[in-house]
Amino acid sequence: MPFQRFVETGRVAYIAEGPYEGKLRAIVDVINQTRALIDGPESGVPRHGIRLNQLYLTKFRLRFPFTASTHVVRKAWKESNLDAKWAESVWAKKLEAKRTRANMNDFDRFRLNNARKIRNKITTNAFLYLKKQAKSKKTEVKGGKKEGKKPAAKKVEKKK
């Protein structure tokens, strides 16, 4: 099945643009092909209609009937423990890392750069050490002899 996330009642969506950008909300009802009624009682998003191209659909879905009241949506949100699930998701972690990186000052970037240099030096040295070990084991298996060049392929003469 190619599509896994549908615009449906209860689907949790991430707001891509507008005054509530970056908040989660649940789709309560589909108004037409381009708009949906959304409600985010736990994220501070009031119930209103929004264009579908302003939403990113998540993998989470709440179970409640369509056009449910804010009270029902809030209850389903809390029962499913959606905020904790969202915080554990890869998407939320990437957004948090992006936010952290954007808020770095010059000194933080300097420290990050130095930490990367140290990490890369350690991994390079470990790789070269393992490569050297593998090469020495390879020569031991073949009796300490190094392989010469492979014989050239025989040329086939064409008949005229």
Image (cartoon, rainbow, N blue to C red):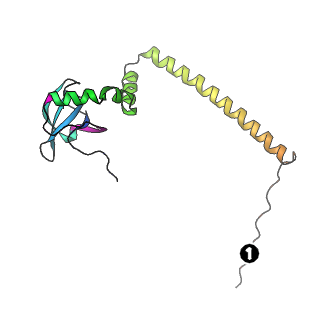
Residue under label 1: 156
Is residue 18 shown left or right of residue 130?
A: left
**Image quadrant where residue 130 sits:** top right
**Image quadrant where residue 135 sits:** top right
Looking at the image, which residue is at 71% across and 80% down? 158
For mark 1, does the 10 Å Cα neighbourhood hold few (<14), some (14 to 19), or many (20 or more) residues? few
Q: Residue 128 or 133: which is nearer the viewer?
A: 133
Q: Residue 157 or 74: which is nearer the viewer?
A: 74
Q: Position of residue 32 (x, y in %)?
A: 12, 46
- Check the picture and name the quadrant holding the C terminus: bottom right
Looking at the image, which residue is at 63% across and 26% down? 121
Q: Residue 150 or 72: which is nearer the viewer?
A: 72
- Amino acid on which disc 1 is placed: Val
Residue 23 at least partly seen: no
Instruction: Based on the picture, tell me whether residue 56 belongs to the magenta stretch.
Output: yes
Residue 11, placed above or below residue 98: below
Looking at the image, which residue is at 17% across and 30% down? 72
Q: Residue furthest bottom?
A: 160
Residue 116 at least partly seen: yes
Q: Position of residue 7 (x, y in %)?
A: 22, 44
Q: Position of residue 152 (x, y in %)?
A: 78, 63
Q: Residue 114 or 129: which is nearer the viewer?
A: 129
Q: Which region shows up in magenta? A: 54-70
Q: Position of residue 113 (x, y in %)?
A: 52, 22
Instruction: Based on the picture, tell me whether residue 138 belongs to the magenta stretch.
Output: no
Residue 153, placed above or below residue 111: below
Q: Residue furthest top?
A: 107
Residue 112, placed above or below residue 52: above
Is residue 111 shown left or right of residue 127?
A: left
